[in-house]
Image (tube, grey):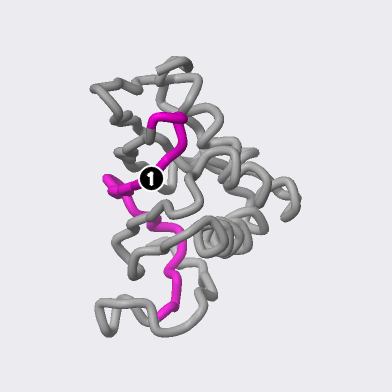
Amino acid sequence: MTISPNAFTERYVELWNETDPDIRRKKVAELYAPDATYIFYRRDPFHGQEAIAEQVTYTADIYHPMGYVFKPAYNATAHHNLIRFNWAMVHRVTGDLQMAGQNVVALNDEGLIVEDYQFHDKIPNAFVYNDGFEETGKVTRPAKPTPVQAAS
């Protein structure tokens, strides 16, 4: 591996924070192999750079307008062609932690992701997605986050 696990994680997290769609697609191509698969618990696996770029954009369209950014935990470790790392999603102004998770990525010989497994350790509690997952166990419609009112 020619890049340190934490440096790789920084590049990965930068992708998910990118606000420009063209740069975002370029970063997907720089990180993922053309036939890569991204596996996320709320959705069916995404196959190929185009589908992965669409999911990253979908995620950006949900979280960026609400003021959230992703941060690496700087605890990445490598094992042969695998990298495991943690991340957090925080509000860019308040620092409020809304989501935390872990990814395990498998890299090819060129250092590109061929498989990306995402796990969530903490899911948001300030809003609900309203994407059908809570009712059916799978996403049935585009997410339209709704803030959750704090108990008084």
Out of 9 and 72, give the one closest to the viewer.
9
The 10 Å Cα crowd at callout 1, few under 14, some 14 to 19, many 20 or more, is many
Quadrant of the image for the C terminus? bottom left
For image coordinates 35% across by 69% down, the residue present is 43
In the rendered structure, does residue 110 fall within the stretch colored magenta?
yes
For image coordinates 39% across by 54% down, the residue present is 38
Q: Percent from the top left, x then y, of residue 127?
A: 46, 64
Out of 127 and 53, give the one closest to the viewer.
53
Position of residue 74 in the picture relative to residue 27 (left or right): left
Query: Farthest residue in the front direction?
Result: 109
Which residue lies under the disc numbered 1?
Answer: 114
- Reply above or below: 51 against 83: below
The image shows a total of numbered marks equal to: 1
For image coordinates 45% across by 70% down, the residue present is 129
For image coordinates 34% across by 38% down, the residue present is 105
Q: Is residue 24 visible?
A: yes
Position of residue 82 in the picture relative to residue 6 (left or right): left
The amino acid beneath tag 1 is Val
Quadrant of the image for the N terminus? top left
- Reply above or below: 4 against 83: above
Position of residue 72 in the picture relative to residue 106 (left or right): right
Q: Percent from the top left, x then y, of residue 46?
A: 41, 63
Q: Percent from the top left, x then y, of residue 78?
A: 29, 21
Tell me which segment is drawn in magenta: 109-131
Q: What secondary structure is found at the residue carrying circle 1?
A: strand
Q: Is residue 152 visible?
A: no
Out of 77 and 98, give the one closest to the viewer.
77
Q: Percent from the top left, x then y, of residue 25?
A: 66, 52
In the rendered structure, does residue 99 fall within the stretch colored magenta?
no
